[in-house]
């Protein structure tokens, strides 16, 4: 009986690795670029790999690089990262209803590896998500991100000094590349991004807040305003249908 359970677990783990392979391949260029940019930002090889090991969140790590380059207080960087990744709490709650019953510590371990991509793979699975499958998806994705971050740093270190300094521009290009596709799909995202940019520029221009606090407050204010507007629109729509 125990042997059968172990075989089933191994089978689910292999299926998880197979399902996560596409994520691992997709992470390759993004993690590589992160490692390269972290070198130009001034991080060491060990700091770069450690950030990927501990944070494992692409957008937040890129944001951290820009905040580090601006000399932002570390506490503000952590707080900003928390706000950006707060959606993961909802993802975890959603997946909790789909995964098999398991010990809390095991769920806590693989919950660390929930990203937009791993969540999508597990959430769209037809059957209940087994622990083995979850670990398989997350392990191969995690290894790809961490290993390729390190490789990117090594490649960045081998580049001429002039190219290393010029690569800082790629950090802003990456943010634009992440934002534009979402803006093309939804006017709400356009409004949110524009509002956040306005608040951040206002705080920065008039020196009301430092870089870290300006980003945090701008993000919160924009999100609240957009949601209030959306709620009012839905309420008017319901009243019109009555």
Image (tube, helix red, strand yellow):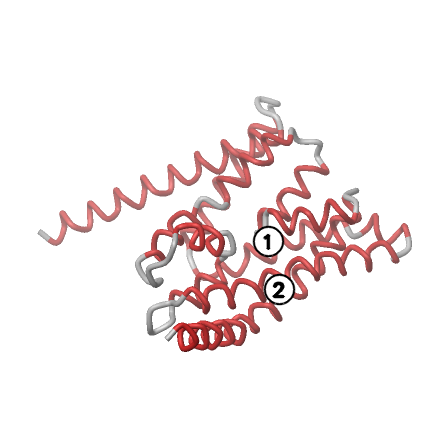
Disc number for residue 27: 2
Residue 227 vertical position relative to residue 25 in the rendered view, above or below: above
Q: Residues within 10 Å of mark 1 (few under 14, many from 20)?
A: some
Disc 1 on helix, strand or loop? helix
Instruction: Indicate left or right for 152 with 80 as reference.
Output: right
Identify the image quadrant of the N terminus: bottom left
Taking depth in this image into account, of 63 and 199 the one nearest to the observer is 63
Disc 2 on helix, strand or loop? helix
Residue 133 vertical position relative to residue 61 in the rendered view, above or below: below
Instruction: Indicate left or right for 198 with 240 as reference.
Output: right
Q: Is residue 183 visible?
A: no
> Horizontal and vertical percent for residue 10?
49, 74
**Residue name at image x 35 percent, y 62 percent:** 99
Q: Is residue 160 visible?
A: yes
Taking depth in this image into account, of 65 and 112 the one nearest to the observer is 112
**Residue name at image x 71 percent, y 57 percent:** 149
Instruction: Indicate left or right for 177 with 165 as reference.
Output: left
Q: Which residue is mark 1?
A: 58
> Horizontal and vertical percent for residue 4?
40, 77
Disc number for residue 161: none
């Amino acid at each position: 009986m125990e042997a059968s359970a172990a075989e089933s677990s191994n089978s689910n783990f292999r299926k998880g690795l197979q399902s996560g392979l596409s994520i691992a391949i997709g992470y390759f260029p993004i993690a590589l670029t992160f490692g390269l940019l972290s070198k130009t930002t001034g991080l060491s090889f060990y700091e770069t790999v450690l950030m990927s090991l501990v944070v494992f969140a692409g957008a937040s790590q890129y944001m951290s690089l820009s905040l580090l380059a601006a000399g932002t207080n570390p506490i503000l960087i952590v707080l900003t990262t928390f706000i950006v990744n707060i959606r993961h709490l909802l993802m975890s709650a959603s997946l909790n209803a789909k995964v098999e019953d398991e010990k809390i510590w095991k769920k806590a371990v693989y919950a660390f590896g929930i990203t937009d991509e791993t969540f999508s793979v597990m959430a769209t699975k037809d059957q209940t998500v087994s622990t083995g499958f979850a670990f398989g998806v997350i392990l191969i994705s995690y290894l790809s991100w961490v290993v390729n971050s390190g490789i990117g740093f090594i490649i960045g270190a081998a580049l001429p000094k002039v190219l290393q300094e010029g690569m800082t521009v790629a950090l802003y290009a990456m943010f634009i590349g992440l934002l534009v596709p979402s803006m093309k799909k939804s006017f709400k995202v356009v409004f949110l991004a524009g509002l956040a940019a306005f608040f951040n520029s206002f705080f920065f221009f008039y020196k009301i807040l430092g870089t870290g606090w300006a980003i945090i407050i701008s993000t919160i204010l924009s999100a609240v305003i957009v949601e209030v507007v959306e709620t009012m629109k839905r309420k008017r729509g319901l009243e019109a249908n009555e």
